[in-house]
Image (spheres, rainbow, N blue to C red):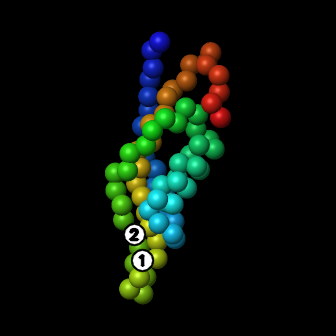
Amino acid sequence: MQRTYKIIELIGVSDLSYDDAAKRAIERASKSLKGLGWFKVTELRGLIRDGEVAEYQVTLQVGFRILDDAEPSQL
């Protein structure tokens, strides 16, 4: 079986944590992309407001398989 993969970049945002930001990005992407298989965190950053952390931002590379027409949907 031959497989082809594509990598996209996502940025997740959360008021709670980096972990929550990553989860939100993956959950959102899974609503419209098929064949999601893995992710890699490439950057952590955040927003400071009034001397406190106001927002967590996570940049992710997400890999997903390009499905053949004959393969069943993975949604």
Q: Position of residue 54 (x, y in %)?
A: 46, 76
Q: Position of residue 33 (x, y in %)?
A: 58, 38
Q: What residue does disc 2 label?
A: 46
Q: Amino acid at mark 2?
A: Gly
Q: Amino acid at mark 1?
A: Val
Q: Earlier in the sequence, mark 1 or mark 2?
A: 2
The 10 Å Cα crowd at callout 2, few under 14, some 14 to 19, many 20 or more, is some
Q: 71 left or right of 59?
A: right
* Quarter location, residue 67: top right
Q: Position of residue 30 (x, y in %)?
A: 59, 43
> What's the residue at 52%, 36% (across, down)?
36
The 10 Å Cα crowd at callout 1, few under 14, some 14 to 19, many 20 or more, is few
Q: Position of residue 66 (x, y in %)?
A: 51, 26
Q: CB under 8 Å between callouts 1 and 2?
A: yes
Q: What residue does disc 1 label?
A: 53
Quadrant housing the C terminus? top right
Which element type, helix, strand or loop, lies under badge 1?
A: strand
